[in-house]
Image (cartoon, helix red, strand yellow):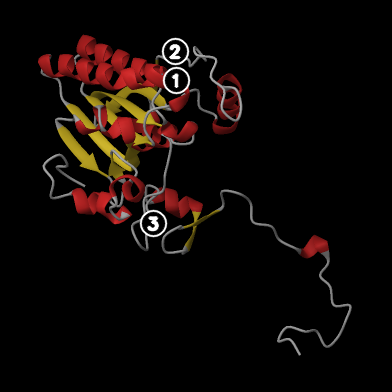
Amino acid sequence: MGWFQRFRKGITTDPSEKKEIKDGLWFKCPKCKKIFPYETHQDNLNVCKECGYHERIGSKRYFEILFDNNEYKVLFSNILPVDSLNFVDTKPYADRLTKTMEISGEDEAITVADGKINKLSVVIAAMNFNFIGGSMGSVVGERISRAIDYCIEHKSPLLIISKSGGARMMESVLSLMQMAKTAAKLTQLADAKLPYISLMTDPTTGGVSASFAMLGDLNIAEPGALIGFAAIEEMIHLKEDSGRAQALRPAPHIEAM
């Protein structure tokens, strides 16, 4: 006899008595599996109170946390991605862009905004992982370049929050060009004696980690973040933990966590 076999048949629950948990009401930590009210989780800045796991969040949430009174101005939203190469994999790139915009609510893998932190003006460029894996295409590179020009014009520091799987394959060489382009523009920011802070979150890999993410005057890593250029085990035969922020902390290119 099964442990959960009923001795009496016909015991049912009225569907009207079933209580459903609304989406967004609770947060279940992927790491420790603890469950918290989502409001409590947000009050703790989207960090698990039990184990310290950092939830992946998008640009809007970063702006809400960082900018004074959640007041900021979004920049360069008129620069939007196009399918210059008529690329097709499992679906046309143009269709993928349209669908991703609908699902994510974002118009690209990076959003740039100008605001104040502790009453000091700062420009923040935050990446959105839910937009094609936060991949770097030509618009990502262009928005970063324009953000740097804006910083130079307004004498503002720059904070880039990286969260990306790397270069966007659907844009081929147009994507790879952004590595050199953003690195060159950051040289102009350095020549203007303006600080650039790079915050690397989970994950920061591929062409993003090999370009602007590692070029900060101050490089900060989110605890537990996967950071590295190559796919860890498949390419260089190292275990995944070797690319975590804690393992990289002794290295000179990460100053703080």
| Residue occupying the point 36% across, 30% down | 126
Question: Which residue is label 1 attached to?
Answer: 171
In front: label 1 or label 3:
1
Q: Residue 194 placed where, x, y %?
A: 14, 20
In front: label 3 or label 2:
2
* Picture disc at residue 79: 2
Residue 243 placement, left or right of 140:
left
Q: Residue 6 placed where, x, y %?
A: 80, 84
Q: CA distance from mark 1 to mark 3?
A: 36 Å
| Residue occupying the point 21% across, 40% down | 220
* Picture disc at residue 48: 3
Q: Which of the 4 image quarters holds residue 100?
A: top right
Q: Of the residues shown, which amino acid type is indicated by label 1?
A: Glu
Nearer to me, 30 or 207 = 207
Q: Which of the 4 image quarters holds residue 110?
A: top left
User: Which is more N-terminal, label 2 or label 1?
Assistant: 2
Nearer to me, 109 or 86 = 86
Q: Quadrant for the N terminus, please.
A: bottom right
* Res 128 seen here: no
Q: Of the residues shown, which amino acid type is indicated by label 3?
A: Cys
- Eyeballing the image, is 112 above or below 28? above
Q: Of the residues shown, which amino acid type is indicated by label 2?
A: Ile
Tell me if mark 2 has few (under 14), some (14-19) or many (20+) residues whose alpha carbon lies within 10 angstroms of its own.
Answer: some
- Eyeballing the image, is 216 above or below 140? below
Under tag 3, what secondary structure? Answer: loop
- Eyeballing the image, is 56 above or below 218? below
User: Which is more N-terminal, label 2 or label 3?
Assistant: 3
